[in-house]
């Protein structure tokens, strides 16, 4: 991993993503229509390639900018960690959105340290450990969601740019 490289990728990420939003949207929709059989394998390869060079501890945008979804089993695990009840944990840290899904009350996340380390790493919500979902199964079904992550995660931006080289549409 490379700190300098990560800082470069973070430079103007949101501006670049905004400028290219329409192009990215069109491309990902076309890719979905094209339905390449090897899409999951290609994503996995690009995911590994990109994360080989990115230092998540330098970035930490997913912990600072987005608000992960906290499911019941995450609440149970975290409550146990803090030696409290699920209800007690939820009252202290969580809020429900319009759809009834739980998120942390505060953003950045209350568990991100100044050194960008997650203070509940072993118990962190599934939505955190699976983020940015670029090595999931059924990446075709994830393509639309992926778009929302382009301005958040420099790795997603890079993976989408590299995809264009693999599938020029
Ligand atoms: S729980 Fe940990 S991994 Fe999840 S957002 Fe907070 S600091 Fe980041
Ligand atoms: S936003 Fe992406 S690159 Fe940044 S810390 Fe999260 S997963 Fe790593």
Image (spheres, grey):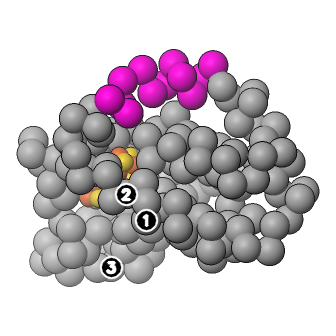
Q: Are marks 1 and 3 in contact (CB under 8 Å)?
A: no
Q: Any magenta on residue 106?
A: no
**Residue 89 point in image, percent of width and height:** 26, 65
Q: Are marks 1 and 2 in contact (CB under 8 Å)?
A: yes
**Which residue bears the numbered disc 2?**
51
Mark 1 vs ligand 2: CB below 8 Å: no
Judge whether residue 161 can be spotted in this image. Answer: yes
Mark 2 vs ligand 2: CB below 8 Å: yes
**Residue 69 point in image, percent of width and height:** 47, 59
Q: Quadrant of residue 100?
A: bottom right
Q: Quadrant of residue 161?
A: top right
Find residue 48 and name its label. Answer: 1
Judge whether residue 133 can be spotted in this image. Answer: no
**Residue 66 point in image, percent of width and height:** 43, 43
| Residue count near mark 2 (Cα–Cα under 10 Å), binned few <14, some 14–19, many ≥20 | some
Task: Say whether residue 40 is left or right of residue 159.
Answer: right
| Tag 1 secondary structure | helix
Which secondary structure is most common in the magenta stretch? helix
| Tag 3 secondary structure | helix
Find residue 76 and name its label. Answer: 3
| Tag 2 secondary structure | helix
| Image position of 54 with respect to 69: above or below | above
Distance from label 3 to label 2 (Cα)?
A: 30 Å
């Amino acid at each position: 991993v490379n700190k300098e490289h990560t800082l470069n990728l973070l430079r103007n990420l949101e501006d670049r993503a905004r400028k290219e939003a329409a192009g990215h949207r069109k491309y990902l929709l076309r890719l979905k229509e094209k339905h390449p059989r090897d899409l999951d394998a290609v994503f996995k390869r690009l995911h590994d390639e990109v994360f080989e060079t990115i230092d998540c501890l330098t970035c930490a945008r997913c912990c600072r900018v987005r608000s992960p979804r906290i499911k019941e089993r995450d609440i149970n695990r975290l409550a146990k960690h803090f030696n409290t009840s699920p209800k007690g944990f939820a009252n202290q840290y969580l809020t429900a959105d319009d759809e009834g899904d739980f998120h942390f009350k505060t953003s950045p996340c209350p568990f991100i340290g100044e050194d960008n380390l997650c203070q509940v790493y072993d118990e962190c919500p599934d939505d955190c450990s699976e983020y940015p979902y670029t090595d999931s199964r059924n990446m075709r079904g994830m393509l639309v969601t992926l778009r929302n992550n382009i301005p958040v995660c420099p790795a997603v931006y890079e993976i989408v740019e590299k995809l264009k080289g693999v599938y020029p549409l």
